[in-house]
Amino acid sequence: MELTELRGVGPARQRQLLRLGLTRAEDLVFHFPRAYEDRSVVKRLAEVQDGDRCSVLAHVATRPAAVRIREGMELLKFRIFDDSAFAEVTFFNQPWVKDRLEHGEAYLFYGSWEAFRGPKRVTNPSFERPGSPDAGAILPIYRTTAGLSQHVLGGLVGQAVERLAPGLEDPLPEDLRAAYQLVPLQQAIGDIHRPGSSAAVERARRRLVFEELLVLQLGLSRLGRHAPNETSVRIDPCDMTPFYEGLPFRLTDAQRRAVEEGLADLRRPVAMNRLVQGDVGSGKTAVAAALAYAAARSGYQTALMAPTEILAEQHLRTLSGMLSPHGIGTALLTGGLRAAARREALLDISSGRAAVAVGTHALLEEQAAFAALGLVVTDEQHRFGVAQRSRLAAKGDRPHLLVMSATPIPRTLALMIYGDLDLSVIDQLPAGRRKVETYVVDESMRPRIDRFIKKLLGEGRQAFVVCPLVEEGEDDRKAVQSYAKALGALLAPHRVEALHGRMKPAEKEAVMRRFAAGETAALVSTTVVEVGVDVPNAALMVVENAEQFGLSQLHQLRGRVGRGVHQSYCILLSRNRGERAMERLKTLCRTDDGFEIAQMDLQLRGPGDFFGRRQHGLPALHIADMGRDLEVLREVGEAAAQLLAEDPALEGPALRALRGRAEALFERSEISLN
Ligand code: ADP
Ligand code: MG
């Protein structure tokens, strides 16, 4: 049905609706409220607490009088009462209110109440006569656009629901609804837009979330990601003793377990698809090295892809340190190589001379050809699209895949993003690690922080300072350089260097190398150090404008220190003194459990952090929220598995509608996962 078939929609309204992405009247039915104004809670004035949002049934006690405070600012003030107390009502710049309120009459006033000192007060409340349709109701609040009021939009949605909802077919079969206690679609649509109670909102929402996630899950499984991928790559069991004995440390039990799980996968005729999840510093690289060792022993190459050049270079150092004593050659391939070095790397890789190729996206380029690629490892996978991982895999004959991530994504989510995969968790840090002492401070602590940095550097330690760009488009070079200069003056004679995104890879590496070698005492950077950089003597991480980061990101940054024997510190500077901002950051003082932190991030910021659409390649969600709805997601996983077990092609008449949705979902979005 065309938008213009709705009463009150002409060309101007239509344009406003189009701006909201609503192209047909049907879309309005599925334009769900982003929040509700719950006016159903009615309190007596005496019960109202400071900060309450609620309704109060009260009489107008004094005749509303308008006062002009200054040009363009008019104040309307009057008193109301119920049988328990009096209160004051103020309206700013709403002169018409005067004519709608009658002295002595009772109204339901809804708003945010103030109740500290003096009489209780409310400003710009909404008010209705008792018994009118909106009085004491739970009102939807929609995402809207300039010129389109909540009232008008709500009216249009109501109209669309009234005319179209009765014709909607419920894609969820009845027995599924019964099994998971899901209300029928029409009821859900009715309740989500015009709920009679907050319980009704919850029921409606759960049902709609379930449907959305189920469609997504079925769509993903139809892409065939769950089919076992047979491979000819066979990596035989080998004696790992020389590798273990050559390491400068003993693997932790958790690392050992991850290696064993990986080795067991490698010898199977089905390509491994394994996620190694381990907090920062848990030693994931050694696990990758162990598997690369086994692959090399069977004549296969390993490709390890890292998100940044610095990280790729560091991995190369680590891996060649662990592998070259065993005669296993390595090569580095990054975008920043000079032509000659690049030619040589490509040749080493294509000839098989390098059994291990470490690199960035450069590994994906067409010229990068492998002699016998058997194992693909990606580090910090959530930064790579699924498609990139597949492109690298295509350089071999269905090689084994290992994904390393420090982001502890709940398993249900991991399944959704990566498809069917196995999980190894490294839930143990190498012995002797000390907790990084973490502080959240504001600007007033600056002098103390400066003294603290000086003191630590005086003891021979090193420091990272991270200063993110404050404004988009700001020149990171300037910002970082001027900061580094100021810090250098403060810390002289200690050397301070800057690292920023616009440096040439060779410059960056030189700076990192000087820092790693201890020639530089403090390193000031944007976020290029975020992932994986390892400098054991660094004992201090200072993060400026910490409020701009997600908690997981900060946790990763903090993981840059505390890697050696020294007590380490992390100082989070926040310009935002708001209680909530500070509270959020203080989570990091309380815990160093990456899983708990990620969970907190999900709750506070939503899934955007790990789930930028670009990163995971899943279609956008309308109502489900990967942070809030993990429990529903778990049920959906179970339901999808059962549906697919009973009817793998979803051909039965009861599933036709669901299948249609699942297919449409991935037709509309341009992504493909393989
Ligand atoms: P991440 O899991 O964050 O990638 P890394 O692999 O970079 O961690 O390892 C962090 C540091 O811990 C490195 O310096 C590494 O050499 C060291 N390391 C790894 N495993 C162990 C271990 N079992 N015992 C002691 N140190 C270890
Ligand atoms: Mg790492």
Image (spheres, rainbow, N blue to C red):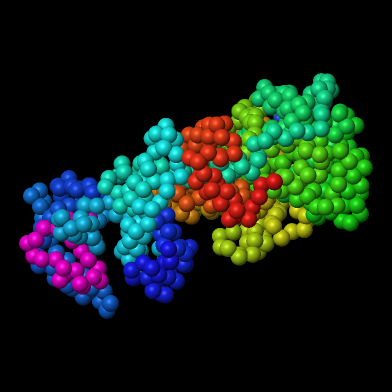
- Residue 97, quarter of picture: bottom left
Q: Which residues are magenta?
A: 87-110
In which quadrant is the N terminus drawn? bottom left
User: Residue 118: percent from the left, percent from the top?
Assistant: 17, 54
Q: Residue furthest bottom?
A: 71
Indicate left or right for 180 with 396 as reference: left
Q: Residue at x 56, y 63 (%)?
A: 471
Is residue 308 part of the magenta span, yes or no?
no
Between 288 and 242, the one lying in front of the other is 288
Q: Is residue 5 above or below residue 86?
A: below
Q: Is residue 464 among what the camera can see?
A: no
Between 314 and 660, the one lying in front of the other is 660
Q: Quadrant of ligand 1?
A: top right
Q: Is residue 575 among what the camera can see?
A: yes
User: Residue 285: percent from the left, percent from the top?
Assistant: 73, 35
Between 213 and 385, the one lying in front of the other is 213
User: Residue 402: percent from the left, percent from the top?
Assistant: 71, 36
Indicate left or right for 430 with 607 as reference: right
Numbered disc total: 0
